[in-house]
Image (tube, coloured by chain):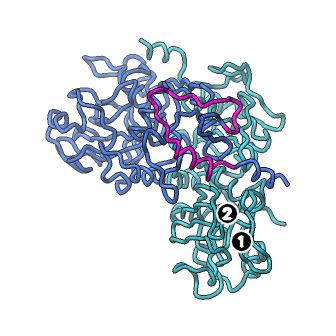
Chain colours: A cyan, B blue
Amino acid sequence: MAERIFGHIPGYPEGSLFESRAELRESGVHRPIQAGISGSQTEGAESIVLSGGYEDDADDGDLIIYTGYGGRNQSTGRQDHDQPFSHGNRALALSKQNGLPVRVIRGSKHDSRYSPPFGYSYDGLYAVEGFWHEPGRSGFEIWRFRLVKIPQKVTAGQGVREDPAEYSVARRQEMRVSRIVRDSAKARKIKALYKHRCQICGTRLSCPAGPYSEAAHIRPLGAPHDGPDTEDNILCLCPNHHVLFDNGAISVAKDLSLIGADKDDLTVHRHHHISLRHLAYHRKHLAVVPDFEREASV
Amino acid sequence: MAERIFGHIPGYPEGSLFESRAELRESGVHRPIQAGISGSQTEGAESIVLSGGYEDDADDGDLIIYTGYGGRNQSTGRQDHDQPFSHGNRALALSKQNGLPVRVIRGSKHDSRYSPPFGYSYDGLYAVEGFWHEPGRSGFEIWRFRLVKIPQKVTAGQGVREDPAEYSVARRQEMRVSRIVRDSAKARKIKALYKHRCQICGTRLSCPAGPYSEAAHIRPLGAPHDGPDTEDNILCLCPNHHVLFDNGAISVAKDLSLIGADKDDLTVHRHHHISLRHLAYHRKHLAVVPDFEREASV
């Protein structure tokens, strides 16, 4: 199976119409022929189809309250048991946790004014801003997901080629809460390399949807620093050390010893080449060095 | 002196013109009669004036690279020593750290196409997205700040009355990086009450600009939860525990004991009344309870 693509599928812009699930599958916009959620518990969800299957969905256009998977009786189609926190539900929770964009497709059977008259329409990228559980109309527990439209202008051109420039624009626009971090494929790779353990303190946060860590850019992205979104410019940190690193409390010496931390050395995986040039940039410009601190405390 | 106001000053919308610094002071849009930065090291910076004083400022309209305070010879006005990380510079760094909006005023002497022909113009709210130091043209170290315009539509109506609804909109638009958190006055009050110590683990992150913590809403803001931005719905947490709490890994029982954490009890200040109703909401809907976890691990 092809690699999972988070973001637009090249050649299928927002508004693309499809006659059938088979056509959707072929395009790569939504690959499962039956399941409403395409994703995995370890990577996150890449796309969902609103097809009227669930009585509890609520569709307000830019805001969708999406009902999770499962809990339905195969023959009657009615909810007759609780939905599990697994499979597609957990994949969507992971997309929320890691700030991955989800492709939303509406089918004609989906009961909303935004549904196409026939077939399926690809309606763009949404951010999963939250997930929770509650009793559905049936009385059984369901998982629900708050999906908010990502403005099209900031996602145009996104897709397989993850252009950091586009990302930095996307970041500015998409963020709704402090925790939605939009990672590039490179950032995800570094985080996986360390199994989400902080390179400074070794902490790995265990969230229900999976382990959590953050990708910290050593030389910041965007003007005037214009650091690259490359593996040698990314560290895997816990949120606490990400804050300390970004605010100049902690830096890294060229021998990879830590400056301003209570640990001695940065943990570095043998397959992770870190740019000494970018580390030097962080020390020279981002770190708040002792003599500045002394002046501050005057 | 009146309380510091972060955001628009009611009665003075973006585009307001002022004849003099005295008029600016009277309006409250920028209160110091001389200083270019209005703020304090403990609260952050509320406003800055671009008046052409510094040779190193760069003004691109929506993006301003602002040069910090100090380092200049009083008589010649030239940089002849390093700028300190203190006073206004540290206040701006704190505004970045805590995601506070800064009012930007341009003076006619400020050399840019965005300057008014005479007097001063209030040009709206900017987010401080980063701070760093580098040698200025003079060769002496200067502090620099990246200021990015906050779209006017999302800040309209903001000011003293901090409407959480407006905030949730503002959040969605302003965020560029994961760490810019926009706090309301109530959130700032709770964080100060705990002196930025995490109510779960007691951690306080020491950043160069000051201690860092995050305000976590127990019952989330925004539809469908519509939790209030009130002190009884806010916890002071470190970023790590904020992630765990928001993702349902940790919750709080009605006796304030912790669920899913390695500590026993939530630390609660005697002046902090926490709503048991909101805690119950978090347990009921946001927490991922053991039986869901079991199903997930199947």
Which is nearer the eye, B270 or B121? B270
Q: The numbered mark 2 sits on a residue in which chain?
A: A
Which disc number belongs to residue A142?
2
Residue indicated by mark 1: A79
Q: Identify the amino acid type marked 2.
A: Ile
The quarter of the image holding the C terminus of chain A is top left
Label 2–label 1 contact, CB within 8 A: yes
Q: Residue at x 77, y 56 (%)?
A: A41
- Whether residue B279 is in magenta: the answer is yes
Query: Compared with residue A276, is residue A28 higher up or lower down, i.e. above or below?
Result: below
- Quick one: SS at disc 2? strand
Which stretch did the figure color magenta? B259-288
Pinpoint residue B24: horizontal percent, then vertical percent. 19, 37
- In the rendered structure, the answer to whether residue B260 lies left or right of residue A56 reads right
Q: Residue at x 38, y 28 (%)?
A: B43
- In the rendered structure, the answer to whether residue B27 lies left or right of residue A112 reads left
- In the rendered structure, the answer to whether residue A120 lies left or right of residue B106 reads right
Query: Compared with residue B173, is residue A216 higher up or lower down, i.e. above or below?
Result: above
Q: Identify the amino acid type marked 1.
A: Gln
- Whether residue B179 is in magenta: the answer is no
- Quick one: SS at disc 1? loop
The quadrant in which residue A1 appears is bottom right
Pinpoint residue B136: horizontal percent, then vertical percent. 43, 27
The quadrant in which residue A253 appears is top right
Counting other residues with Cα less than 10 Å from the Cα at mark 2, is it few (<14), some (14-19), or many (20 or more)? many
Pinpoint residue A173: horizontal percent, then vertical percent. 50, 55
Which disc number belongs to residue A208?
none
Which is nearer the eye, B149 or B207? B207
Query: Compared with residue B142, is residue A1 higher up or lower down, i.e. above or below?
Result: below
Task: Work out whether mark 2 precedes mark 1 in sequence or the reverse, and give the earlier one.
Answer: 1
